[in-house]
Image (cartoon, grey):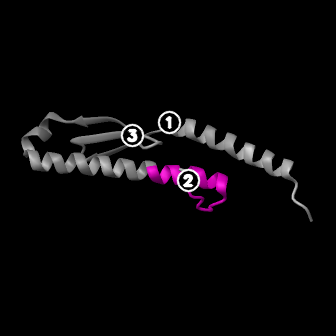
Amino acid sequence: MGLDMNSIMRQAQKMQEKMARIQEELANERIEHTTGGGMVKCVVNGQGEVLSISIDPEALTEGHEMLEDMILMAVREALAKSSDLQQQRMSSITGGMNIPGMM
């Protein structure tokens, strides 16, 4: 049973096209996480880029350390959700295999 290099190359090209489409879709996804009862909101896209951070003026009265913690938590959680979404979408292509360098 020999390897059909043309078939392998076509499959690799299809996989590459699917990956490019998923990357485009991820760039358009909006993921948000709020902390402090909604006082701080971080919005990221599916590629892990921070798009916005919103701070309710009421949060400014909480003290700077508390505000810093709320911002940090909102950013970390939004990025974690983005990473989970990336892994979920890419596993649809890789069949759940963890292929280094895919994302």
Q: Position of residue 8 (x, y in %)?
A: 80, 51
Magenta: main secondary structure: helix
Give me the disc on residue 101.
Answer: 2
| Disc 2 element | loop
Location of the N terminus by quadrant is: bottom right
Specify whether 16 is left or right of 45: right
Q: Is residue 31 magenta?
A: no
Q: Is residue 2 above or below residue 54?
A: below
Specify whether 35 is left or right of 102: left
Residue drawn at 69 percent across, 40 percent down:
17
Q: Is residue 86 magenta?
A: yes
Hey, what amino acid is under mark 3?
A: Val
| Disc 3 element | strand
Give me the disc on residue 27.
Answer: 1
How far is mark 3 from mark 1, CA to CA?
9 Å
Q: Is residue 29 visible?
A: yes
Q: Earlier in the sequence, mark 3 or mark 1?
A: 1
Residue drawn at 56 percent across, 35 percent down:
24
Hey, what amino acid is under mark 1?
A: Ala
Choose mark 1 or mark 2, whichever is in front.
Answer: 2
Residue denoted by label 3 = 44
| Disc 1 element | helix
Q: Position of residue 85 (x, y in %)?
A: 50, 50
Viewer-side residue, 38 vs 84:
84
Quarter of the image holding residue 58? top left
Q: Earlier in the sequence, mark 3 or mark 2?
A: 3
Give me the disc on residue 11.
Answer: none
Viewer-side residue, 64 vs 60:
64
